[in-house]
Image (cartoon, rainbow, N blue to C red):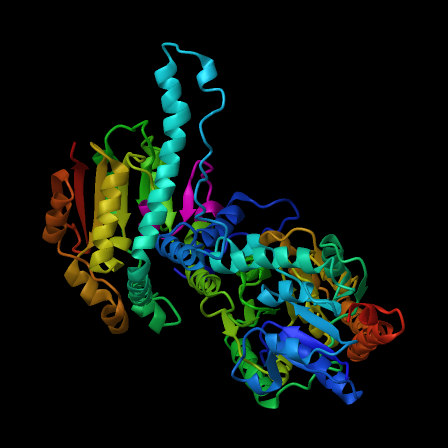
């Protein structure tokens, strides 16, 4: 019996691509579609949910649709490109290698390989699904003739309620700082500690803010240290700027705890150099946190006019924008209202259904007389 | 000095980055590992590991003799032509063949070689993780270490450097609040301060003094990457007390190399008793290094080839000055 099967290099829990893959599988299965997840390498935590990709050669059925979750380099890309089944590339953006080159040559090489693989699998794909128009343009540039944009399916809408314990702890900390007369603005940055995320620019801006407009400003960085050299340098930078007591590094938290951090923050600062979508933008808008973001990748597409979009991000420019915004409560309120409207307009709650419907339509087409699946199988 | 103490006038701008912002961001870029020893080792290991899967290491094919070789006729230059056209190709081919032969001969031993390299890599990781045990242990730097008071030597400093050189700047590390750089600048020297504390860098930029050069970097790393004979002199203060012994020795070696013959080296070092007395117990116990006795410094400087050494004892018992010239 034909099915819609997904291929992902590794299936991780609490990872954006991993959760996306699992959510899509669950929705397909709920609709009675035969679906399996194949991986290049097993993750011990999810090994029971996956099968080795080479096993598919024995399990292939005429009319199958294969969905490749493309986020990084994998031998599966070329293997899939050489197969005859109807192929969908669900593209999750490849960070350009130039960001990693000075920090981790190994990752940079993998990113280069990823781009080569994209150029091989792109023209072969019957459909490319991107989370943003920015990513769709990359897919088209790689030779993918047919693309659709469906925003990420795994953003919690409405937002998960804040974890009460974390929220209470953050509230007490704020009260204590107010008593110490050091209650400045609370900045939040969310994203992996990786070079393209521009966290160092945020730290530099915080330093300048504390030296000029807001001596009590603080920053919470929520993100997994995914590139060790960069993460280590970031901590060193914080110390050398005398910001040890003003910057908190937070990682390994769940959605409810993350909600608490959003709730305890005055502004989301996002100075990333490359974003295929920008989930934190949506999270902040949905939770009524104003956003100041650098205009890179899909940021302007996602944020629209519901936040402050920066065309430059040197420290004084960022500080100036934050100072103006946070000093204008009416403007903050206006942007927060706009943000909520914008997120509602994205209809993210139905993104998963749209994704499934799109892939199922392709599968139906493949099985129809003269369809791609019938012709190739 | 805390960062808050150094707050200059609030100035925000929509223009491009100012020089202080550029230096602030450059300070982060200098933390990139690219080009370092560990980076090079890791990269070499990776290239070795990937060998055979990539496109490298292909042998050079025999291209044969140039077809027109014998048609060129006999001339006085035939020898040169032979070397260029034949021997060149032959040498390349032989080199490629030799490499193949060596690889083939190594086949049996290759596994052991790989194992040795991998153990070396693991050893390197282990050593690297021990470089900064205090930093790994603590979330914050040892800020209680007091700022050295260099004012007692400020007036004499310019005299030790004599007339300004045209060969390169005088490096002051750590330049702190800029007192020593200002003194040398007034005496006509080109000066560059090196300072690892961002708030001091920021404050220096905030003060009037457009000719100031301040680099946001660790002094040891700055001098390690300085070219030979590229500076006319070096003043070291603060960092010489804090570094652990091997760091002190590395710093001295790079200082002498960067200064070159006839250049001046000045060390302003804390008095051991004063250091012990003034430092909080936690900082005293956990600081990676402690001041050396001036006699020890003289011994080390001599070993590194510094001559005409003078020890100027501290007038107030806090900080000694050691002055010398790099030998020719």
- Please say if B29 is above or below B97: below
- Please say if A362 is above or below B221: below
Q: Locate residue B43, reporting x and y percent.
A: 41, 55
Using the image as rendered, state which of residue B125 and residue A109 is in the foreground: A109
The residue at 74%/57% (across/down) is: A123
| Picture quarter with the C terminus of chain A | bottom right
Using the image as rendered, state which of residue A312 and residue B315 is in the foreground: A312
On the rendered structure, is B200 left or right of B184? Answer: right
Reply yes or no: does residue A345 show up in magenta: no
Using the image as rendered, state which of residue B51 and residue A128 is in the foreground: B51
Is residue A213 shown to the viewer in this render? no
The residue at 16%/55% (across/down) is: B317
Residue lying farthest to the front in this orientation: B70
Using the image as rendered, state which of residue B226 and residue A267 is in the foreground: B226
Q: Locate residue A357, reporting x and y percent.
A: 83, 77
On the rendered structure, is B201 left or right of A219? Answer: left
Q: Which residues are magenta?
A: B203-225
The residue at 55%/70% (across/down) is: A221
Q: Locate residue B312, reporting x and y percent.
A: 14, 45
Q: Quadrant of residue B162?
A: top left
Q: Quadrant of residue B138?
A: bottom left
Is residue B31 shown to the viewer in this render? yes
- Please say if A340 is above or below B276: below
- Please say if B119 is above or below B246: below
Q: How many marks?
A: 0
């Amino acid at each position: 019996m034909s099915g819609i099967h997904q291929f992902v290099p590794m299936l991780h829990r609490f990872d954006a691509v991993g959760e996306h893959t699992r959510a899509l599988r669950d929705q397909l299965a709920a609709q009675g579609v035969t679906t399996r997840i194949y991986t290049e390498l097993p993750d011990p935590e999810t090994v029971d949910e996956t099968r080795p990709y080479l096993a598919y050669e024995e399990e292939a059925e005429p009319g199958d649709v294969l969905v490749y979750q493309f986020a990084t380099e994998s031998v599966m890309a070329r293997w899939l490109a050489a197969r005859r089944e109807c192929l969908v590339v669900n593209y999750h953006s490849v960070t350009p290698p130039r960001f990693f080159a000075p920090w981790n040559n190994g990752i940079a090489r993998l990113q280069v390989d990823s781009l080569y693989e994209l150029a091989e699998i792109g023209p072969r794909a019957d459909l490319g699904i991107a989370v943003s128009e920015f990513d769709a343009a990359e897919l088209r540039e790689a030779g993918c003739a047919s693309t659709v944009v469906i925003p990420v399916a795994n953003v919690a809408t409405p937002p998960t309620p804040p974890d009460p314990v974390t929220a209470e702890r953050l509230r007490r900390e704020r009260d204590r700082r107010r008593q110490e007369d050091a209650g400045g603005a609370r900045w939040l940055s969310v994203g992996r500690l990786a070079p393209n995320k521009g966290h160092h620019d945020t730290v530099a801006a915080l330093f300048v803010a504390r030296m000029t407009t807001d001596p009590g400003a603080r920053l919470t960085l929520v993100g997994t240290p995914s590139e060790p050299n960069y993460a280590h340098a970031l901590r060193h930078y914080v110390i050398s700027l005398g910001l040890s007591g003003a910057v908190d590094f937070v990682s390994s938290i769940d959605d409810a705890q993350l909600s608490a951090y959003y709730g305890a923050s005055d502004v989301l600062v996002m100075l990333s150099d490359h974003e295929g979508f920008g989930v934190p933008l949506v999270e902040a808008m949905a939770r009524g946190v104003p956003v100041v973001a650098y205009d890179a990748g899909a940021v302007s597409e996602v944020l629209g006019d519901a936040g402050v979009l920066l065309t430059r991000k040197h420290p004084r420019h960022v500080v100036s924008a934050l100072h103006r915004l946070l000093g204008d409560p009416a403007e903050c309120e206006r942007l927060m209202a706009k943000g909520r409207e914008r997120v509602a307009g994205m209809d993210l709650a139905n993104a998963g259904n749209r994704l499934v419907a799109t892939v199922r339509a392709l599968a139906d087409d493949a099985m129809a007389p003269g369809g791609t699946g019938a012709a190739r199988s | 000095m805390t960062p808050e103490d150094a707050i200059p006038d609030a100035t925000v701008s929509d223009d491009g980055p100012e020089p202080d912002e550029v230096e602030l961001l450059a300070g982060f870029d200098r933390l990139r590992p690219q080009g370092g020893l560990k980076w090079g080792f890791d990269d070499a290991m990776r290239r070795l590991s990937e060998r055979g899967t990539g496109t490298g290491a292909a042998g050079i094919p025999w291209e044969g003799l140039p077809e027109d070789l014998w048609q060129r006729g006999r001339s006085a230059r035939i020898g040169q032509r032979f070397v260029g056209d034949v021997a060149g190709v032959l040498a390349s081919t032989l080199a490629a063949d030799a490499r193949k032969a060596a690889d083939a001969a190594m086949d049996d031993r290759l596994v052991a070689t790989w194992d040795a390299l991998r153990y070396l890599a693991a050893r390197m990781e282990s050593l690297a993780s021990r470089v900064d045990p205090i930093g790994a242990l603590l979330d914050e730097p040892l800020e209680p270490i007091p700022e050295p008071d260099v004012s007692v030597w400020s007036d004499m400093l310019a005299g030790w450097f004599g007339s300004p050189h045209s060969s390169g700047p005088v490096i002051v590390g750590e330049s702190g609040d800029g007192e020593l750089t200002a003194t040398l600048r007034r005496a006509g020297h080109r000066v560059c301060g090196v300072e690892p504390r961002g708030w001091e860098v920021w404050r220096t930029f905030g003060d009037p003094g457009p000719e100031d050069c301040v680099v946001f970097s660790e002094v040891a790393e700055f001098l390690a990457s300085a070219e030979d004979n590229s500076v006319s002199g070096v003043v070291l203060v603060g960092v010489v007390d804090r570094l652990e012994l091997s760091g002190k020795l590395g710093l001295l070696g790079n200082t002498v190399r960067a200064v070159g013959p006839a250049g001046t080296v000045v060390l302003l070092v804390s008095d051991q008793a004063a250091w012990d007395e003034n430092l909080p117990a936690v900082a005293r116990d956990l600081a990676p290094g402690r001041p050396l006795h001036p006699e020890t410094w003289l011994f080390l400087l001599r070993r590194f080839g510094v001559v005409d050494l003078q020890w100027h004892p501290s007038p107030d018992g806090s900080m000694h000055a050691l002055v010398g010239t790099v030998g020719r």
